[in-house]
């Protein structure tokens, strides 16, 4: 098996999304991970693997799915985002040319969820990886419009902890640069992913049967956790493919999701598991203040409404 596509879902995906998913060609499996107690429809496509997670939540559902994939490479995809139907050809070509790479960062196009014209337009032809120019990490010249492979370094996790992070209005800068933080919508080597997920789940077992698993979001948590597991300063993870799109990421306003999705718990877990990395402490305090600001805003808004000051 070449590629596994892991998607946590509640089963409320659109028929259009499902048709597009199963139109992906080549040596691929589709791993749909449902929460417990969810009604699951039957699928005739033998490439579809259904898993029921022991708990509800994006983190545990995606983690369980990642542990049960068979592909040499794996990509995490939400149930409203789209992949190029010939993506397996590109993945195969890339890793044959760059077998030591851990990650292939695909070219992603952010699209508003109501822009059906862009969502449903035909896909452009994929680039020939062998003909693309591979450039260094710091390459800047018009890269967004050129079909090139830009080196992506590992996140600089050994950045020093900044005392300014303790300030309520501090701003984070560690994320600046071409290094990746998030895991989703990128192609990763399966063995590296599974080793990180296994360690992550083991670390969440606090005392006996007591387990602490953040509800949201495995995206940044796993992306950084994986890099911490293999960290060597300055190593190259792989390449970032610029140019035509291979991923369509559907942007949805947070107000339409009906729930607050904070990544604070996942960032705390990173800092506790890898306390030697200043990068994670800077991230933790930044998200702690961000969560506190959201909490205070919510409470103040509720009080204002109760007093009749907000229409």
Image (spheres, grey):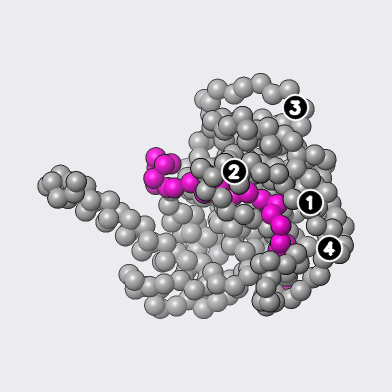
Q: Nearer the viewer, mark 2 or mark 1?
A: 2
> Which residue is disc 2 drawn over?
117
Q: Please state the horizontal and vertical placement of residue 116, each as a whole percent of the image.
A: 57, 41
Mark closest to the chain's N terminus, 3 or 2: 3
Q: Secondary structure at mark 1?
A: loop
Question: Looking at the picture, how far across and down is residue 274, in whole percent?
Answer: 55, 65
Mark 2: secondary structure: helix
Q: Are marks 3 and 4 in contact (CB under 8 Å)?
A: no
CA gap between label 1 and label 3 equals 26 Å
Q: Disc 3 versus disc 2: distance between alpha carbons?
A: 28 Å
Q: Nearer the viewer, residue 167 or 256?
A: 256
Residue stretch rendered in magenta on the structure? 231-260
Q: Which numbered disc covers residue 98? A: 4
68 drawn magenta:
no
Q: Earlier in the sequence, mark 1 or mark 3?
A: 3
Distance between the Cα atoms at labels 4 and 2?
35 Å
**Position above or below: 22 against 227:** above
In the rendering, at what x and y percent does residue 146 appear? 72, 67
Q: Is residue 274 left or right of residue 196?
A: left
N-terminal label among 4 and 1: 4
Q: How far across and how far down the image is residue 273, in percent?
A: 54, 60
Which of the numbered marks, if any, corresponds to residue 45?
3
**The residue positioned farthest toward the front in the image shown:** 117
Q: Is residue 133 among what the camera can see?
A: yes
Report the residue marked by disc 1.
125
The image quadrant that residue 35 belongs to is top right
In reply to whether residue 257 is colored magenta, the answer given is yes
């Amino acid at each position: 098996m070449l590629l596994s596509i892991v998607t946590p879902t509640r089963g409320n995906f659109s028929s259009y999304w499902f048709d597009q998913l199963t139109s992906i060609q080549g040596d691929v499996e589709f791993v749909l991970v449902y929460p417990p107690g969810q009604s699951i429809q039957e699928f005739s496509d033998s490439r579809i693997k259904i898993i029921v997670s022991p708990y509800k939540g994006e983190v545990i559902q995606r983690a369980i799915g990642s542990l049960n994939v068979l592909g040499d490479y794996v990509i995490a995809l939400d149930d409203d985002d789209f992949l190029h139907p010939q993506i397996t050809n590109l993945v195969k070509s890339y890793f044959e040319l760059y077998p030591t790479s851990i990650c292939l960062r695909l070219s992603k196009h952010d699209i508003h969820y109501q822009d059906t014209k862009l969502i449903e337009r035909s896909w452009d032809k994929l680039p020939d990886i062998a003909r693309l120019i591979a450039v260094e990490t710091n390459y800047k010249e018009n890269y967004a419009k050129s079909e090139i492979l830009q080196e992506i370094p590992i996140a600089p996790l050994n950045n020093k902890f900044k005392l300014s992070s303790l300030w309520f209005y501090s701003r984070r800068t560690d994320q600046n640069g071409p290094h990746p933080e998030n895991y989703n919508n990128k192609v990763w080597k399966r063995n590296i992913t599974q080793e990180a997920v296994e360690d992550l789940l083991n670390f969440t077992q606090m005392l006996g049967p007591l387990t602490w698993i953040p509800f949201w979001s495995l995206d940044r948590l796993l992306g950084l956790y994986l890099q911490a597991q293999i960290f060597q300063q300055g190593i190259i993870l792989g390449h970032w493919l610029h140019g035509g799109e291979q991923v369509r990421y559907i942007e949805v306003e947070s107000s339409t999701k009906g729930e607050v999705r904070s990544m604070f718990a996942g960032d705390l877990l990173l800092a506790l598991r890898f306390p030697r990395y200043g990068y994670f402490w800077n991230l933790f305090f930044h998200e702690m203040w961000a969560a506190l600001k959201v909490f205070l805003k919510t409470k103040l808004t509720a009080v204002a409404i109760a007093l009749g000051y907000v229409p």
